[in-house]
Amino acid sequence: MFIGKSLARTLLGATVLSSALAGHAFAQDEGGEAEASEQRTLKSVQVTARRRSESLQDVPVSVSVADAEDLERQGISATTDLTQIVPNLQFATYGTLTGNNSAAQVFIRGIGQTDATPGVDPGVGVYIDEVYMGRSVGGAMDFRDIATTQVLRGPQGTLFGRNTIGGAVLLTTNRPGAGNTIRVGVGEDNLFEGFAAVDLLDLDTVGVRASLGARSRDGYVTRAVDGADLGDENSWTGQVSLEWDPTSSLNVLVRGDYAKEDENGSPFVFLDINETAAFPMIASAFAGCPGSSFPPPTPVPNVDDPRCANDFQDRGPFVNGGTGRIFSTLENSGLSAVVTWDVNEQWTLKSISSGRKLEWAGARDADNTPLLILYTNYSSESDQFSQELQAQYTGDRLNGVVGAYYFDETSKDRVIVQLGTPGTSYDTNRVELTTEAVALFTEWTYDLTEALSVTGGLRYTEEEKGIQGAWFNVAGVGTPEPSIPTDLCPVVGAPVAGCLFVARTPFTEDFSSVTGSANVAYRFNEGLMAYASFSQGFKSGGFNQRYNALLNTDGSPLAFDEETAQSFEVGFKSNPAPSVRLNGAIFSNAYDDIQLTYRVGPAPLLFNAGEATINGAELELYYAPTDALIVDASIGYLDAEMDTVRTVPDLGAQTPTATTQAGDRLPRAPETEFHIGASYVFDIGSRFELTPRLDVSYRDSIFFDAGNDIGEDSVTLLTGSLTLADVMNDWRISLRGDNLTDELYLLSGTTSASTATGYSEGIYARPRTFSLVFTKDF
């Protein structure tokens, strides 16, 4: 069996633990009327994993869900925090290739994407209020007025469709009528957080709700050259919601949201450098490093001199040695309208319309030294429109949905790269990328008996990807936005300053896919349901937008094909006692034509790397025997390694060297991770409650790249909080500590050590911090 002995022991131990908890709960039931009155029955948890509201324990899908109360209790205040509590989810921030702080790297069960540029689609779909977020940038966000979070594991290719090959993260904000809240927080590193959500209008048929939030905090990495603090936070968010019931069967929900960030830049630091790589040698020679020469370039001498690109540039985990201007900005806005019409008792029609605009920029001094080796300056803007129509049917034994989906996006991207030869900029701006996608889908569930149900679904998708770009060099430092040359270079494809490398010809690629799903579920009794499922996922291909002198014979950029996944899963949902919820799943994924990023010279490019088999399991426990005690725990296991690897095309001197190999682990796929947290409410008289909480999370070693060249060892994190609540006046104040044991570990990293640029950089986690948050509900 593919699950290892260690995991089997873990699952067995968790099962024994849940049985013991259940036994304790039943003992309370038998211990007399007084004790039985304290026995807690878990509230019903609703999810929309099948595009309709159902009980978590009735849905034959692997899904983790948390409402606003759960998130506050567990100290989850951002999408990246979900990593600590959701098994087999890695939700990372800081764009290692973009320099933007909101660039998300989301992986579920070992499937995701590390690159955040518009030419690359994410592998996990992030949805806000049923609207798909087309770009990875903006996915890493703070929670403001969140009602629920749901993490769906495994391919969601039938009901959610494009780019949910690894799974989906569903975020739902509060509707009008949810109640009013004010929250103010302060903490170390000059942390300040302010948030307010108010129901401006709450009538029988019309409701209006508005929320506004701001957050600021100093960075924790200092730039030696100017004292700038990197990793700082400076953001504002707002949302307005209007809900209208013109009739008893018609509901209209309109939401508008806006977010802005203006920050110093990502907290990168120097990790390593290859003293024999071309750009470090050239940069050292031009800087006047003693013993360096050019031409010909000579290995950088091992001397402690700021003009030398060697390991003496290492300033530790919280000091950055770069000199180039760095920053991270974002504006993200959207407008959506969801119209729901209950035609009769069986049929409901639903329309989800949305338009979104994203503008972001980021710059980084990638080598993190005083020398000019590699400096990148990105900016991008994307406009997307989506429309989804659903017809939902609810019968006595038959339930299902039929739908159509349309998505259109245009992105304009610009990047300036300054390399090791002083005074040269390398501009890949004026790249316009387009995506148009249409899909038809359906899924139906039939109850053969009261205990046995079968489900089948199908989705047909067509996508067209387009690119048109202007790639050129600019002699000298140039301006931030140099004008586009009109003439072609004498030799097409040869990087010569002042001319277009290739003609500005538009290119398109078409992709189509049929993805299906099937499921059988059996309910043994009120407390146990088991299921077996099969699902498929698809993510289209596209074009590499970064120019690096690699072209097809027609002058088009290198393209990559779609990737696919097929998943088999067996799972269960159980309530072994009224106060216990224990859910688990075992799965096996066939992951083909995997899109992985390789370094080709200074440019990261995407290739279809090969195939992998991903085996694993999850187990989640929630135990609340009384209103005072809550214990939640989870375990995730992954065996995610490359089976076969495609040979990279011969690209001459530009052929990538740091490629994946058979047996390499997939990026951001730790073998084992677990979490356990507990809180207990102590009554202080009849008015106050004091609640301590402690959380422990463990993550096994992890790699950040395809070649397994950079990563981090295993880490155990401890967080805690102490909350005093006035139950009569609905206020509470919470003291929270994060990373209580002050662990030093990498959050992210990238390396080009085997290429001409020769550097490695990383981002360490923020050291131990404490914060104090006051919340008032009214």
Image: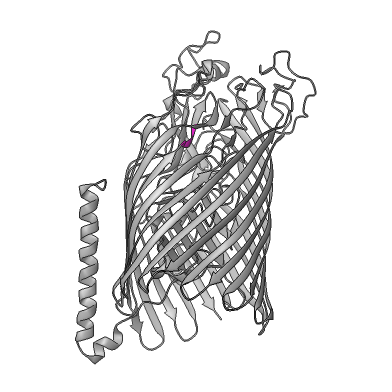
Instruction: Please say whether residue 338 is one of the residues in the magenta stretch.
Output: no
In front here: 295 or 511? Answer: 511
Q: Main secondary structure of the magenta part?
A: strand
Write the start and end of the magenta stretch as one range.
593-597
Residue at the extreme bottom of the image, as rendered:
33
In front here: 650 or 350? Answer: 350
Q: Position of residue 560 (x, y in %)?
A: 55, 32
Q: Is residue 620 visible?
A: no
Query: Compared to 238, does 748 lie above or below?
Result: above
For image coordinates 37% across by 72% down, the residue present is 449
Residue at the extreme front of the image, as rendered:
448
Q: Position of residue 580 (x, y in %)?
A: 30, 72
For image coordinates 50% across by 42% down, the residue present is 113
| Residue 469: quarter of image | top right
Q: In which quadrant is the C terminus drawn? A: bottom right
Q: Is residue 650 visible?
A: yes
Q: How is the image coloured?
A: one colour
Query: Compared to 341, does 144 lie above or below?
Result: above
Indicate left or right for 505 with 177 as reference. right
Residue at the extreme top of the image, as rendered:
296
Query: Compared to 171, does 206 lie above or below?
Result: below
Q: Position of residue 457 (x, y in %)?
A: 49, 57
| Residue 625: quarter of image | bottom left
In front here: 121 or 240? Answer: 121
Indicate left or right for 581 with 143 as reference. left
What is the tally of numbered marks visible in this picture? 0
Indicate left or right for 95 with 446 as reference. right
Q: Position of residue 191 (x, y in %)?
A: 52, 59
